[in-house]
Amino acid sequence: MKNKRILFTLLSAFLTGLSQHSYGLGFLVWFSLVPFVFVIVKLTSYRDVFKFSFIWGFIYHLMTIYWLAQNIGTIPIVAIFSMLLTVFYLSFNTLLIVVIWYYLKKYYNKYNLFLIPIVWISIEYIKSYGLLAFPWISLANTQLDYLYPIQIAEFTGIYGISFWIVSLNIILYSLLINKSTKKIYLLLGLFFSPYIIGYFLYNNINENKLDDLNILLIQPNIKLLDSRDYSKGKELLNKLTDITKSAINNNADLIVWPEAALPFHNIKDGKTFDYIKQKLLINNDIKILSGDITYNNNKVYNSVILFDSKGVQTVYNKQRPVPLAEQVPLSETFPILSSINLGVANYSSGKKDVLFDLGDYKFSSLICYESTFPEINRRHVNKGADFITFLVNDAWYTHGLEPEQHARQSIFRAIENRRSVLRCANTGLSMIIDPSGNVIEKTKLNTESVISRNIKGSDYKTFYTKFGNVFAQLLFTIMIVLILKTLFRNEKNI
């Protein structure tokens, strides 16, 4: 029996992790949790709860983010160690889910199976906040190949998709242990409901759109080793400006350069700005959006800058530096920690949401890792962003799953807010996504590329844009109420 439980746990975690791979395997998660449910419903001690939930969490997260060990920006042993440390930390998400459910099961045994989706999504939601937040591993991200069902993110955000997935598994498990026609109908109804709803949402997108804009996305494909070789600074700047100059057309409204487009230059530097102006802006009334490093009051920021021939117009400072790679957690509270450098630098965190102006348009521009956070994108659209841009540098990963996983999550940001999304990545994958979630153009990895495309902006605000994660917050509230009821019940029994 013990070996069977371990086998079921490993099988469930492996299949669920495999569903996160971008090879059309998202359907696996529709049933991959069932073996794990078979295990946890039979557990009789917290010791076993800890053991099996941690095993599941470790294998699932290892399967999902193994690519951390492929980081070419550090030595292999450090990359492997950081990957294992991250997987170990994330495994406690699963442990927390099962522990809370197991605790509640004793008090609500009759409905205990229905508590699993509530607890699972509640923990997935709250773990997307804080210093070490990581929404990257959400179950919802497995469904990005299926455009119709994920359209409900316009109302529920990604947490509605995760709830659907876990609920499917629970009803399927219930059907397997106690077959009935009613449960078959319930399973079919639950499965097809998002498809039906999504079909109507997809074909009835609000048409409150603004006039076309012509956008140029420049993917310079600057290799990581080249970006660390100071002797190549002028060469890389020339490469970037030459690609851009050859792509500029008379109708272009905005040029977008990626994060780390200028590894050895600063646009606020007079010589660099004058050089770019002479090559690109003298005869062009055009704006350029670019990643840059900025300095303010002894603080260093990973930033986005919008500039034209008159100079820098607007600056946004990244609010979510990557923990340990771009910032040591708590280093701004405890300055002594700022001397530790485990990655690119120890950047400060930006504090403000910023919109950029482009004629009658306003748009947001977030940096790399921030594209995976629904809330920060929602805030910018709620402030008036007509479209969304992401400036990205995935040069740390020249192959494997990371670039694809990272890029695909931008699809949710388009659907949640019904905005066009422009993703400009240094080495790829750059893409343009329409408000329905369609990837209408996409570059290849590790290539020098240009995307020239007309897009439409929109000032329509979805339910999700206006009200945020109320679905997840409702589930979290239910979970807390159920826990509090057990505590009051215990007090009465004393």
Image (tube, rainbow, N blue to C red):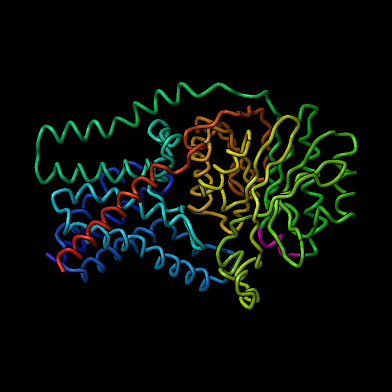
In front of the other: 371 or 277: 371
Residue 124 among those drawn in magenta: no
In front of the other: 57 or 467: 467
Q: Quadrant of residue 395?
A: bottom right
Image point (71%, 60%), residue name? 227
Q: Quadrant of residue 175?
A: top left
In front of the other: 283 or 153: 153
The quadrant of the image that shows the C terminus is: bottom left
Position of residue 283 measured from the top left corner of the image (x, y, whole percent): 89, 34
Image position of 475 (left or right of 489)? right
User: Is 269 rendered above or below residue 169?
Assistant: below
Q: Which residues are magenta?
A: 224-229
Position of residue 274 measured from the top left corner of the image (x, y, whole percent): 90, 49
Image position of 6 (left or right of 355)? left
Image point (68%, 57%), residue name? 302
User: Is 50 rendered above or below residue 455?
Assistant: below
The quadrant of the image that shows the N terminus is: bottom left
Image position of 224 (left or right of 194)? right
